[in-house]
Amino acid sequence: MRMLAEPTGLGRSSVLMPDSVDSFLEGSVSRQRLPVMSQSSPSEARDPKRLALPAGELAQLTDGAEVFRYLACLELRAGTTRGNHLHRERRERFYLVAGAATLHLEDPASGSRTSMNLVPGDLIQIAPGIAHALQVTASGTAVEFAPEAFDPADTHRHPVIQP
């Protein structure tokens, strides 16, 4: 359990809520709903989280030894689809800053498919070999990052949904 700050009218109040991490396609994809916290304890210093600060929210997506060679800010336009592909080498992460979307996933090896609705504060990790398509339902912004540098030869079309 963590002490979280949730919007209540114009101000914020602290409430206790559990961390939320969901696993999909036998652990190949995870979604973590980053908690909004009013303060961070030393034991949580490196944990992904959202801090509600007087100057505005700070989203800490990672703070560890892993090096990221790819970082992109994405504009999301309602009614569009991004992706519909897979990467054989790349371990992709995606953080929804604002807006809303449905993430469609498929494991081509097993044929398993699933979808999940994304809200601001969701941090997604997608393992190599998992096909994914992001269907934007409300315009917004996202951050995409990966330890591997972008390699166009590692982007393989795989229609998960029809755009």
Image (spheres, helix red, strand yellow):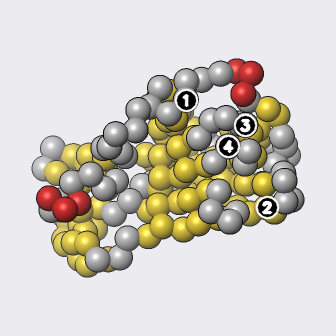
Q: Is residue 115 visible?
A: yes
> Label 3 amino acid?
Arg
Is 72 rendered above or below residue 34?
above
Q: Earlier in the sequence, mark 1 or mark 2?
A: 2
Q: Pointers 2 and 4 in contact (CB under 8 A)? A: no
Q: Nearer the viewer, mark 2 or mark 4?
A: 4
Q: CA distance from mark 1 to mark 4?
A: 11 Å
> Label 4 amino acid?
Pro
Q: Earlier in the sequence, mark 3 or mark 4?
A: 3
Nearer the observer, 132 or 150:
150
Q: Nearer the viewer, mark 2 or mark 3?
A: 3
Q: Quadrant of the C terminus?
A: top right
Q: Position of residue 31 (x, y in %)?
A: 53, 60
Q: Residue at x 73, y 29 (%)?
A: 155
Which residue in the protein does label 1 denote? 148
Which residue in the protein does label 3 denote? 88
